[in-house]
Amino acid sequence: MSGPSTYEPKTGFTKWLDTRLPIVRLAYDSFIDFPTPKNLNYWWTFGGILAVCLVIQIVTGIVLAMHYIASTKDAFASVERIMRDIDYGWLIRNIHATGASMFFLAVYIPMFRGMYYGSYKQPREMLWILGVVIYGLMMATAFMGYVLPWGQMSFHGSAVITNLIGAIPLVGPTIKTYLMGGPAIGDATLNRFFSLHYLLPFVIAGVVILHIWALHVPGNGNPTGVSVKDAKKDTVPFHPYYTVKDGFAIVVFLIVFAAFVFYFPNALGHADNSIEANPLQTPAHIVPEWYLLPFYAILRAITFDIGPIPAKLIGVALMFGSILILFVLPWLDTSKVRSMRYRPFARQMFLGFVIASIGLGFCGANDPDTLIFKFREDKLSLNYTATTGATTSEIFDDFAAAQAKLQSLPPTAGGAIEISKSGFKWLWLSQILSAYYFLYFLVILPVLGVIEKPKPRPASIADSVRKKHGSKAKTAPAGAAAPQAAE
Amino acid sequence: MRLNKLALAALTALAVGAAALPVIAQEHAAPAAGGEQHAAGGHELLAPTGGWSHEGYFGSYDTNSVQRGAKVYREVCSSCHGLKLLSFRNLGEPGGPFYEARWPNPNDNLVVKEIAAMFQIDGVDPDSGDPGKFPGKTSDRFPNPYPNDIYARVVNGGALPPDLSVMAKARHGGAGYIYSLMLGFVPPPAGLTVAPGQHYNAYFAGDTASSWSGDPRHKPPGGFLAMAPPLATDGLVTFDDGTPSTKEQMARDVATFLAWASDPKMETRKKMGVSVLAYLAILALLAFVSYRRIWRNVEH
C-alpha cells in the first residue's frame, strides 16, 4: 500500500531536512497521504482511540509517579493523598484508573473486529501478531498497576497471579521468585512492579510503532476483505477523510470515558481495594479487574485432574493457552475468504464466540459453586455415620423432621444438618463456554475453511460501495467472484 | 451511511455491555475484609427518609448533616476509630462541612481551629524537646485513638476498630451500609447464640450459620461484631443547630460525614463533569458535521 511518496518539501528548511532525515516525509506518507479504503466502518476507528488511550495513560501516569510512594507502609496512603491533597490529583488518578478499563474496552472491540473481518489473514499476519503482543503487554502492565494502590484486592490478586506463574513446570518457581523479589509479596515486589509498570508502557509504545509499520506495508483491510485493486477508485487519503472520522469516534469515546471518570469513578473497581492490604486477612472472593475475568473463568473451569496432570496445572495452561492461541490464529483459520460477511456459517460461529467470551466474563465474576438457577427448592440433608460404619445422607423437606431424625441417632453418629442445593452451577457454564472458546479456534475455524461454501464477493471495494448505494452495479459473476488469489 | 449507523449503534451496545460487566461483577463479588460479606440475598439496606442527598448525578452533600456527623464522630466514634487520612484543615476546604468564603485558607477558619484544638495530638515541646500531648492545629491529622494496633486489640476484646477514612468507599452500599449498621443492632432472634463480648447486627456483612440452631435455610441475616451499639440511645449528642438527636438522625449524619470523608472531592468532580461532558458533546457534534461535509462527495 505504501506506494511512491508524493511528498514535496516546499520550504528551504524542509528541503534541507528531507535529504538528511526524511521524518516529515515519513509522517506525510503515513498519516496524510496514506491511501485508505473508503469503505471502512466505525469498527475501524479504534486505532486512533487506542493511541489516545496510550497517551492519556502515559501522561497521567507520569504525574501520578511524581506523588506515589512505592512502599508497603505508604503506598495506600500516598494514593489517597493524591486523591485529597494534590491539586486535581483526584482527576488525574480517576482518569488513570478508569483509563485502564477504557484501554481494554478499546482493545477488545478491534480484536473482535479483526476476527470477524479476517484482518489477521495474509498479508497481515505480522500486524495481528504485533497486536497480540501489545495486548499481552497491556495485561502485564494493568496487572502490575493494579497492585500499586496496595489495597486488599491488589495484594491478594497479585498473590493469586504469582502463584499461578509458580505453577508453571520447571521455570515457574524461578520466575515467581524474580517477580516477587523475595519469599513473599512485600516491599521488594511493590518496588519492582512500580518500576516495570513505568517501563512497560514505553515498550508498548515501541511495539505500537512496529504495529503501525506493519499496517502501512499491506495497508488497511476493509469490511469486504477484498484487497485494494485501484488506489484511485478504492481509496481516499487518510487526511482529511479518516482524521475527521476517527476524530469524531475519539470524541464519542471520550464522552463514555468522561462519564465514568466524573460520575462512576469506582464502578469499574472493587470496594475491597479501598481497604489497605492485609496479608493476614484474605477476602472471601478474590476477583481480578473485569478485563481479565474471562481468563480467570477459564482458569477456574478446570476442577478435575487428567491422568497425572493436576487440575491446577491444566487450568493455568489453558488460561495462558487461551491468549497464546491468538498468535497462531492466522494459520488456524484455513478459509481464503477474509470477511465473514461472505461466510454465512462462520458468521454464526463467530457470534457464538463473542457470546462465549462475554459469558466467560460473567463466569469469572461469580463464585463457581453458586447456582445460576435452581432445579428445585433447597432441601435439607442430614449427614451421619450409620451403625454399619457407612456415611449416610438423608434428604428432608422439613426441618422438624430432620431434627427429629437427628435426635433419634446415637451421639456417635456425628450427625449434621446441611442445606442441600441442586441447580445449574456457574462452574458448568464456564466449562461449556471454555470448551466453545477452544473449539472455535481448534476445530471450527480450521474445518469451516475447508467445508464452507462462501457467498460471492464483490469484485472490488469501489464495486461494493457502488452496489450499496444502488448505482450501476458491475458485480462479478457469482461462481468466479473475486479470484481467491487476488484477495 | 446506513451501515455505518448500524455499526455505531452496535458499537454503543457493545460499549454499554462491556461497561455493565464490571457493575455486575461488583454486584456479585462480596467484600470480605475481616470475614465480612455483602448482606445480599433479599436483605435490603436501610435508607433514611428522603434518601441520600449526595447520590445521583447532581447530588451534593447535605452540609448541615455533615457538620452534625462530624460532631457525632468526635463525641462517639473517635474514642475507638481513627480518621488518619484526614487533616483538620480538610473540614474547612471547599466542599468541606465548615468551609466559609471569608476563610479561603482553611487554616484561618475559626471553627476548624476550634475543632482541632479539641483533640490532643502527640508532639514535641518546641522549647524543651520533651514529647507530650498538645492541642491539635489545623494542619494536624486526626489522631489515632490508640498508640498501636496491638494495644487497640487488647482493649477491644481482640478486635481492631478499623480506621474510618475511606469506610464509605470500602463497603458495598457506602453511606447506606454505615447507616444500616448503626441501626442494625436488633435483639437476636430465638435460636441464635451470641457469644460473650459479641453483638448481633442484622446488617453487618458477616455470617450467622455457626451460631444458628434452627433451619439452616432460614439463618438470620447479618453477623456479629465486637463493637457494642454505639448510638444506642437518643440524645447521645447535642446538635448545635437544635436538630433532635434521635438514633436515626445521628446514624444518618455520621454516615453522611463518613461519605464526605471518603470522597471529599465529589462535588468538585460532579460539577466539572457537567462542563466536560457539555464540551465534549458540542465537540462531537462539530466533528460529526465536519465528517459529513468532508465525505459528502465520496461514496462509501
Image: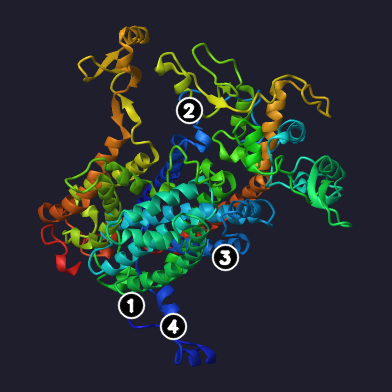
For numbered disc 4, what is the local secondary structure? helix
Residue B247 location, quadrant? top right
The numbered disc on residue A2 is: 1
Chain to which the residue tagged by mark 3 belongs: A
The chain letter for the residue carrying disc 2 is B
Checking the image for residue A62, the label placed there is 3
Q: What x and y, as percent, mark residue A219?
A: 32, 70
Whole-Å distance between the Cαs marked 3 and 2? 40 Å
* Residue A283 percent coordinates (x, y): 47, 40
Please name the residue shown 48% across and 46% down the image. A153
Check disc 3 and give the amino acid type.
Ile
Residue at horizontal 54 percent and vertical 19 percent from the top: B194
Label 1 vs 4, first from the N-terminus: 1
Disc 4 packing (10 Å; few <14; some 14–19; many ≥20): some
- Residue B164 visible in the shown view: no
Q: Position of residue B81 (x, y in %)?
A: 68, 37
Q: Chain of mark 4?
A: A
Which residue is the extreme one toward the front?
Answer: A412
Q: Mark 2 and mark 1, same subunit?
A: no
Position of A336 with respect to B165 (left or right) is: left
Of tags 2 and 1, which is closer to the observer? Answer: 2
Q: Determine which residue is flagged by label 4.
A: A25
Report the Cα–Cα distance between label 1 and label 3.
35 Å
Could you confirm whether marks 3 and 2 are on the same chain? no
Classify the position of the C terminus of chain A by image quarter.
bottom left
Q: Which residue is mark 2?
A: B40
Instruction: Name which residue type carries label 1.
Output: Ser
